[in-house]
Image: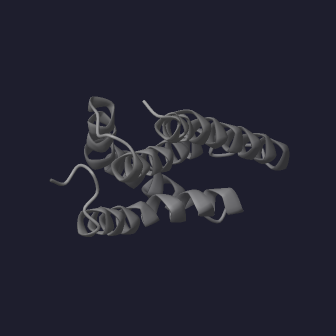
Amino acid sequence: MTIKEIIIAVIIHLIIPVFGLIMFLKLSTKMKLEMIYPPILEFFIIFATYGGLLLVMLTSIFWKWSGLASLGTFYLILVAPILLILIAYQQFKKRRVSKYHDWAFKISAFYFVIVPLIGLILYLTEPNWVD
């Protein structure tokens, strides 16, 4: 394994997830300070889903496809849409409570636009896993 491959692997599989976790924790702290009942669980699911989407996308472009990438893809295709539909439905009713509820609604609904676009872009650019 070359230095370049090690750096790519560390960035994709360590730095990006840690950065996402730090951002989630900062947002959670900010929401707790601003309101009584923030949608913390919903944002955890949203962060995990979009973070997984970013990891799968970067893995397909810059790294070697693996079993873990396949599991992440199955989550993004089979489980994430169900969870995000539930979050969007739940937050649609609460979207006027706070800006965080409104963001949770919009971000979870946006998933159904962005995932097909990313899939199409990855397919058209012929990443490593399309041979």
Residue 114 coordinates in the image, percent (x, y): 40, 66
Note whether residue 82 is visible. yes
Report which quarter residue 25 is drawn in: top right
Determine whether 10 is above or below 82 in the image.
Answer: above
| 7, 104: nearer the viewer | 7
Q: Residue furthest left?
A: 131
| 44, 19: nearer the viewer | 19
| 106, 24: nearer the viewer | 24
- Name which residue lies at 63% across and 35% down: 18
Residue 129 coordinates in the image, percent (x, y): 23, 49
Q: What coloring was used for the rendering?
A: one colour
- Name which residue lies at 27% across and 48% down: 77
| 127, 56: nearer the viewer | 127
Residue 43 falls left or right of residue 60: right
- Name which residue lies at 32% across and 68% down: 121
- Name which residue lies at 62% across and 57% down: 101
Quadrant of image for the N terminus: top left
Residue 108 coordinates in the image, percent (x, y): 47, 58
Q: Residue furthest right?
A: 33
